Image (spheres, rainbow, N blue to C red):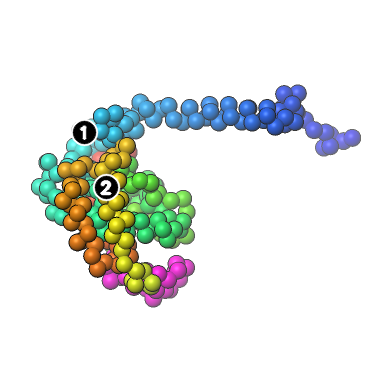
Amino acid sequence: MSDHDKIYSTRFQDKVERSTVLMFIVTAIVLAVGGIVEIVPLFYLPNTAMNSKDGTFNRTVHKDGKGNVVSMDKIVWNPATSAHKTLEDWQPGDGVRPYKPLELAGRAIYIREGCYLCHSQMIRPFRDEKDRYGHYSIAEESMYDHTYQWGSKRTGPDLARVGGKYSDEWHRRHLKYPREVVPESVMPNYYWLEKMPVNVAETVQTLKVMTMMPFNPVSKTIYTDAYINDAKTQLEGKTDLDALIAYLQGMGNHIKFEEGVNYRD
């Protein structure tokens, strides 16, 4: 027998590979150790440790070039300190806010149609990505996403900063017949979304659930009972296409990013 035909293994390895039960136990131990190494630091690092009182990551700290801490009110919309007190008054740059009813309906359609399979919503802090898509994504921008829509593949472009980049009419044409505006697109046609009414009952229920999430719940001072009830009126006569466009137009324009601020700490 030549050296190439020999099987090199330790007695322990040989024993493990011949026993299904032992292989399962060893695999479980290895995965447990790896999981502990990755998870434990999340409980004490400043930008990932969760506040037990309100379920928010409010220990996150962003600093400017001089080391001064940037107020979280510039990152996350706070009606108490903002000049714009309601969701309807909110303006781009006021900070990350909860979804409006039509946007929330659009998000459900985005997930239902599997848009996340071809589009990401996570701009990495690399120069080429910043040049193409805009400022890199930060954690607070996903605080009201349950579950996150970061994605893992880019058959199409990243959508994290698509809000306001194109007009509503552009999105309407692109969603219905993508190749009319982007000839090389491989995206399917979604013309039928224009004929489907928004699921009002489901969206209203989602608004209620958003106030009960175990972490980063939407305050009931924002999603008040009156606001949730009024959502039915806001959604009346709207189509799935209207909702999806509203969702896309609300992406990535919540924060006014400042030069010289390190948003990764």
Q: Residue at x 31, y 37 (%)?
A: 215
Q: Which quadrant, please, contains the C terminus?
A: top left
Q: Which disc, if any, is residue 208?
A: 2
Q: Which disc, if any, is residue 35?
A: none
Left or right? Give the position of 43 relative to 76.
right
Answer yes or no: is residue 3 visible. yes
Q: Dot 2: what SS?
A: helix
Between discs 1 and 2, the one toward the N terminus? 1
Please provide percent x and percent y for residue 226.
16, 51
Please provide percent x and percent y for residue 222.
18, 46
Q: Residue at x 30, y 46 (%)?
A: 209
Q: Is residue 173 magenta?
A: yes
* Region rendered in magenta: 166-190
Q: CA distance from mark 1 to mark 2?
A: 34 Å
Q: Dot 1: what SS?
A: loop
Toward the left, the furthest residue is 83
Q: Residue at x 41, y 27 (%)?
A: 41
Left or right? Give the position of 219 relative to 194.
left
Corner quadrant of residue 71: top left
Q: Which quadrant, please, contains the N terminus?
A: top right
Please provide percent x and percent y for residue 78.
17, 42
Corner quadrant of residue 108: bottom left
Query: Which residue does the numbered mark 1 point to in the structure image?
Result: 69
Answer yes or no: is residue 129 visible. no
Quick one: 192 or 49, which is closer to the camera? 192
Please provide percent x and percent y for residue 118.
45, 58
